[in-house]
């Protein structure tokens, strides 16, 4: 099966505990260290097999093949990708069967990552995630004071809308807010606004 590595933990003798999200499951597997093993890293897409063991409490990761991206050697793109994928671990770590949505979301983002500003790809993907989970607040009502937002909108963690005056953070226009939340498009957002929303995204999904 194929999946994306969303977390790595080193254990004794450089063995690894690897968490992988696939279309069918969220797998936490043990990988033994050895010279014959290829290098794997956070954010990599791999083809792999699970080996069950009656003696071990965790299944073994085996027959790993790295499925590379066309942009894998671009360090800046890879670093941003790893920051993005790491967010999914905390969000999904307690889910045994998260369903295909998250794998498909990551898959789509991986194919667009080098075609535009990757932060835009991540932000648009996050809005789709929020909608999927029923957490996307389309109504222009301030999360902090409950008043209607008539002018610019500030987005805080989980992209909750607030008045600019309530948070004193960089805000976006109503047009950009509607385009992002309704069409999942960052078309009307400037790079400065994208950088601000990226920082908000890194706070957790």
Image (tube, rainbow, N blue to C red):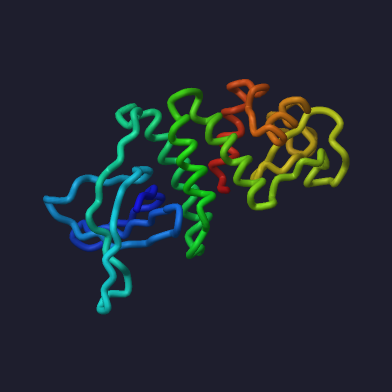
Q: Residue at x 80, y 36 (%)?
A: 163
Work out whether 111 lies above or below 39.
above
Q: In the shown orientation, is residue 94 left or right of residue 139?
A: left
Residue 157: where, in percent of width, then height? 64, 44
Q: Residue at x 27, y 58 (%)?
A: 16
From the top left corner, tell me how far across and down residue 103 is, in percent.
Answer: 47, 48
Question: In the image, is 129 to the left or to the right of 13?
Answer: right
150 over 39 or under it: above or below: above
Q: Does residue 92 appear left or right of residue 8 in this picture?
A: right
48 w.r.t. 116: above or below: below
Left or right, 147 with reference to 173: right
Q: How many marks?
A: 0
Residue located 64% across and 46% down the image? 130
| Of 62 and 18, the residue lying toward us | 62
Residue at the extreme bottom of the image, as rendered: 55
In terms of depth relative to the viewer, which is nearer, 14 or 184? 184
Q: Nearer the viewer, residue 174 or 67?
A: 67
Residue at (17, 50) in percent of width and height: 37
Residue that extends furthest to the left in the rendered view of this protein: 35
Q: Position of residue 80 (x, y in %)?
A: 43, 34
Image location of residue 198, percent across then percent down: 56, 34
């Amino acid at each position: 099966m194929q999946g994306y590595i969303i977390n790595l933990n080193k254990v004794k003798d450089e063995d690894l505990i690897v968490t992988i999200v696939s279309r069918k499951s969220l797998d936490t597997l043990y990988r033994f260290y050895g010279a014959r093993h290829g290098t794997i890293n956070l954010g990599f897409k791999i083809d792999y097999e699970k080996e069950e063991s009656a003696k071990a409490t965790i299944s073994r990761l085996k027959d790993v093949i790295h499925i590379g991206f066309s942009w894998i050697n671009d360090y800046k793109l890879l670093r941003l990708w790893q920051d993005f994928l790491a967010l999914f671990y905390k969000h999904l770590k307690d889910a045994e069967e998260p369903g295909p949505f998250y794998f498909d979301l990551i898959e789509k983002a991986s194919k667009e990552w080098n075609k535009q500003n990757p932060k835009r790809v991540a932000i648009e993907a996050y809005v789709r995630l929020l909608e999927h989970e029923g957490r996307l607040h389309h109504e222009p009502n301030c999360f902090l004071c409950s008043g209607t937002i008539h002018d610019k909108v500030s987005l805080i963690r989980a992209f909750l809308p607030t008045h600019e005056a309530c948070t004193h953070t960089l805000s976006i226009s109503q047009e950009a807010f509607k385009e992002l939340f309704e069409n999942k498009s960052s078309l009307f957002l400037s790079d400065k606004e994208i950088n601000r929303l990226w920082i908000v995204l890194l706070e957790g999904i």
